[in-house]
Amino acid sequence: MGPGDDTFWFAGTLNFDFVFYGEESNDIYIGSNGTIVFRDFYLGWGFTHFPSLNSCFVDALVAPWWCDLDASDEGGIYFREFSDHFVVMWNAVPPWVESGPAPYYITCIIIGWASPDGVANSDIAFLYNSSCNEPQGSSGMQGTRYIGTELQYMPLVSEPGN
């Protein structure tokens, strides 16, 4: 995907049945701020709980790490579809900063699998390769403004010498 700050892309229509919160959701939009959506798009910066009644929120939103990311000069955002799953990756994307070096870089992946029968919900996995100290990010997903799941991001902490 093209780099950028506060941007989104229509990645396309999936070639398999992807069921999200009971709705077939095959169009996929990818946001530079760590989100994907299936029925609409939203560029926002996050910092909220799931589900949210916030009027700027959209339905069918998945956010492995939703904050004000900026892939204009560093990092990359990638999408690939396979026969029964898709992968979206934000690779070493820094947050937006007015000046100076980025305080961290986020690398996270969403994998979404086809519905096993076209009716049951599809599986989604969030994978992280980052230690993120950003206090204003959100991790979760929602089918509507009333139904969703908030996740707590917990980085691995190594013991000294391990």
Image: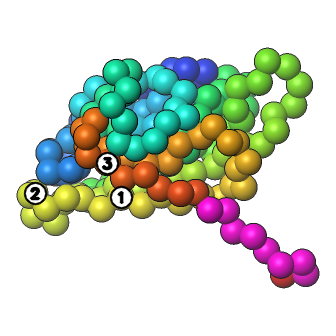
Disc 2 secondary structure class: loop
Tell me, yes or no, whether the highlighted magenta stretch contains residue 121.
no
- The answer to which of 115 and 142 lies nearer the viewer is 142
Describe residue 10's horizontal placement relative to residue 101 as left or right.
left
Q: How far apart are the alpha carbons under marks 2 and 3?
A: 21 Å
Residue marked by disc 1: 124
If you read the primary sequence from the N terminus, does the residue marked by circle 2 or circle 3 appear first?
A: 2
The amino acid sitting under disc 2 is Gly
Residue marked by disc 2: 118
61, above or below 131, in the image: above
Q: List x then y, in percent, for residue 17.
A: 16, 51
The amino acid sitting under disc 1 is Ile
Disc 3 secondary structure class: strand
- The answer to which of 5 and 137 lies nearer the viewer is 137
Inspect this view and state whether residue 71 appears: no
At x 47%, y 56%, the residue is 151
**Chief SS of the magenta region:** loop
Disc 1 secondary structure class: strand
Q: How many marks?
A: 3
The magenta segment is 154-161
If you read the primary sequence from the N terminus, does the residue marked by circle 1 or circle 3 appear first?
A: 1
Q: How far apart are the alpha carbons under marks 2 and 1?
A: 15 Å
